[in-house]
Image: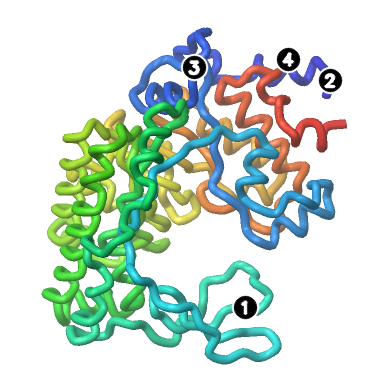
Amino acid sequence: MEQAELKRFAQESVVGQGKAITNAKMTPKERWQRVFHYQAVDRIPCYEFGYWAELYAEWHEQGLPREITTEAQLDAFFGYDRRTGFPVNVDLSPRFEYKVLQEDEHHMVVQDTNGSIGEVNKDGSSSIPHFLSFPVKNRDDWARFKERLNPDTPGRLPADALERAARLRESNLPVGINIGSLFGRPRDWMGFETIAMMVYDDPWLVEDMVETMCNLIIETIKPALRLVQFDCAGGWEDMAFNNGPIISPKMFRDLVAPRCKRIADLLRQHGVDVIWTDCDGNITQLVPHWLEAGYNCLFPIEVRAGTDPVALRQRHGRDLLLLGGFDKMALLAGREAILAELKRLEPTVAEGGFIPHVDHRTPAGVKLADYWYYVREKKAMLGWTPEEIMDCEAARCLTS
């Protein structure tokens, strides 16, 4: 790459000009902590949210080294920052056995590890399964099912927990902990339509499911919080679609938010004050309730679904932290659209409390050259120096 173009990356970075940038070299942990506390950084971290499975084959034909076949390898190829975590199991234990029940030339009917049965593409292409049945249909099913959600089941923490914790206490990477799901996982076990109706038909059952999940999460993370000082905690819900949440905001406030608060209160007692939820779809009506409960960060902020990081910051101010929020469809539209989307986000990124990345996995059809352009421009926007931008395998492979 020409020196003039490298210089342009540094000069055109609005973040580098408008945000309080310090020359002091920082660790990844320090950058994470300071960005999410609106403090000066040497540069903003750069992360991403993964890739569709079909994209690897497409990019191999466009110059990506063929030995790169995993998300971790691709992240390293583009020179992204790293985070780490302490594994806790806040889900089913034991999980159901994955089984292929029947198949034809193009599809398989499988039982997944949640106990749901669905039809999937045989070629492994990315698609939501066509679900045929779910393991929880009524109170009797739930009574048997919830035995797999006992917080005292051995193996909730890794066998080498003490050794892992000692290493993490010395790590210079941001360390996170998984806080699971209160409503999204029960949705998986009942199905979208069933749980949407069950909040009316049998509210006791839904409340018992959410309460069971809350108790499992709290009791599982308690010992981990005593072992490690975490920089963040993240869970997920996926309880919304383009028109809004599965249940009404009032139902969410009454059913889910109080359990969020119990989890957030425990985390804050142990010094964890960056707490996010991963929820696709249009979540704008739920954000005030998450904030009130103590969940102060959103991920991945799906723009085309109606969740806009710029509008959210204008509405909620610095109380709200943001992770994601770059419209993935801009990657398909080419370089002008990519640059326009980055510039749209720049002023909000410059305020702090915002690490931007694609608002869901990078879809098939994105050209490798355009994605590399996105990486370079985004890093420049985040205050990376030209030398830092080019210090990755992608620069050596893709830049002529």
Q: Provide the residue designation for mark 1.
A: 121
The span from disc 2 to disc 4 (Cα, nearest Å) is: 9 Å
* Labels 2 and 4: the sequence-earlier one: 2
**Label 3 is placed on what type of residue?**
Met
**Looking at the image, which residue is at 84% across and 54% down?**
61
Single out the mark in the foreground, 2 or 1: 1
The span from disc 3 to disc 4 (Cα, nearest Å) is: 22 Å
Q: Provide the residue designation for mark 4.
A: 7
Q: Which disc is residue 17 wearing?
A: none
Single out the mark in the foreground, 3 or 4: 3
The span from disc 3 to disc 2 (Cα, nearest Å) is: 28 Å
Disc 2 secondary structure class: loop
* Labels 3 and 1: the sequence-earlier one: 3
User: Does residue 195 lie above or below 89 as drawn?
Assistant: below
**Label 4 is placed on what type of residue?**
Lys
Of the 4 image quadrants, the one containing the C terminus is top right
* Labels 3 and 4: the sequence-earlier one: 4
Residue at the outermost right position: 400
Badge 2 density bin: few <14, some 14–19, many ≥20, Cα 10 Å:
few
Give the image quarter of residue 241.
bottom left
